[in-house]
Image (tube, rainbow, N blue to C red):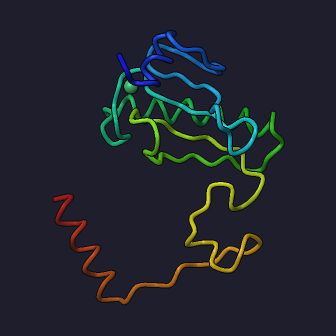
Amino acid sequence: MSCLFCRIAAGELPAHRIHEDAEVLAFLDLHPIRPGHVLVIPRDHHVWFEDMPEPLAARVMAVSQRLARALKATEGVERVAMVFTGIHVPHAHAHLVPMHHLHDISSAAYLANGLDSYSLPPQLAPAEMSAIAERLRKALA
Ligand SMILES: [Zn+2]
């Protein structure tokens, strides 16, 4: 088993475990954006979050909601971000980040006017928006 997060889930590698049950594990990120940055993973190996069976994805969300409420209390923040980026470790993992700054998990698209502002990316042309929406609706059909 070479997957880093599978090894953590199996107890082969240490982690600061915050929560664990039969399906879901949560532990501190080794390289936190902010103190209290937690990763929530399914014990089973799924590369992408959309690969998880829906009940398992719902369990990951439920644990993340509980953790977010706890993080608000322990880290003294108003909001906690949850994001799946699919970067670095190919085992689905949700990042929970106590948000001390509005750009703690930001995109460069929101930073066009610097760190102290929140820039709205430019809108796309209506025809392009319609084409994107149509493409997605066809993909869902
Ligand atoms: Zn894995």
* Residue 5 appears left or right of 138: right
Q: Position of residue 36 (x, y in %)?
A: 72, 35
Toward the front, the furthest residue is 2
Q: Where's the C terminus, which quadrant? A: bottom left
| Residue 120 position (above or below residue 68) | below
* Residue 53 appears left or right of 87: left
Q: Residue at x 50, y 18 (%)?
A: 8
Toward the right, the furthest residue is 76
Q: Position of residue 33 (x, y in %)?
A: 68, 45
Quarter occupied by residue 112? bottom right
| Residue 133 position (above or below residue 12) | below
| Residue 27 position (above or below residue 93) | above
Closer-to-camera residue (73/16): 16
Q: Residue at x 71, y 75 (%)?
A: 114
Closer-to-camera residue (70/18): 18
Q: Position of residue 100 (x, y in %)?
A: 78, 52
Q: Position of residue 46 (x, y in %)?
A: 33, 31
Q: Residue at x 21, y 70 (%)?
A: 135
Q: Where's the N terminus, which quadrant? A: top left
> Dividing the image into four equal quarters, which quarter contains ligand 1?
top left
Total marks placed: 0
* Residue 122 appears left or right of 78: left
| Residue 117 position (above or below residue 55) | below
Q: Residue at x 37, y 89 (%)?
A: 125
